[in-house]
Amino acid sequence: MAETLKKGSRVTGAARDKLAADLKKKYDSGASIRALADETGRSYGFVHRMLSESGVVLRGRGGATRGKKAASL
């Protein structure tokens, strides 16, 4: 998807299905939601919603967790 979408424009019908398929393929290949949002010119929420509607299993955030500390020796 070389061209970015006009911000705020509606994406419907076949164009929406194609965009969803492209986003899914790129996300499954390792691209982040933020990277996809920047690439398409859409918001994080829009890309997140499109992926969810496509049935993608979203990855965890990674990084540090707030769980209990491991017991030290």
Image: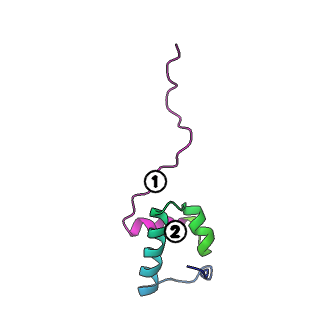
Label 2 secondary element: helix
Which residue, as the protein is rendered here, is positioned at the far bottom? Answer: 14
Q: Is residue 64 visible?
A: yes
Q: Quadrant of the N terminus?
A: bottom right
Q: What residue is shown with label 2?
A: 47
Residue shown at the point (52%, 49%) measured from the top left: 61
Give residue 57's quadrant in the image.
bottom left
Residue shown at the point (50%, 23%) measured from the top left: 70
Helix, strand or loop: magenta stretch: loop
| Three-letter residue code for mark 1 | Arg
Residue shown at the point (44%, 57%) measured from the top left: 58
Give residue 63's quadrant in the image.
top right
Above/below status of 23 relative to 34: below
Q: What residue is shown with label 1?
A: 59
Which residue, as the protein is rendered here, is positioned at the far top? Answer: 73
Name the mark on residue 69: none
Query: Residue 56 appears at what percent x and percent y?
Result: 39, 63
Asked if the stretch drawn in magenta spans residue 48, the answer is: yes
Circle nearer the viewer, 2 or 1: 1
Badge 2: residue crowd in 10 Å (few <14, some 14–19, many ≥20) = many
Q: Is residue 50 visible?
A: no
Asked if the stretch drawn in magenta spans residue 59, the answer is: yes
Give residue 24's quadrant in the image.
bottom left
Query: Residue 40 appears at what percent x and percent y?
Result: 59, 75
Color theme of the render: rainbow
- Give the extent of the magenta segment: 45-73
Query: Residue 8 appears at what percent x and percent y?
Result: 60, 79
Q: Marks 2 and 1, how far apart in space?
A: 14 Å
Badge 1: residue crowd in 10 Å (few <14, some 14–19, many ≥20) = few
Residue shown at the point (41%, 80%) measured from the top left: 17
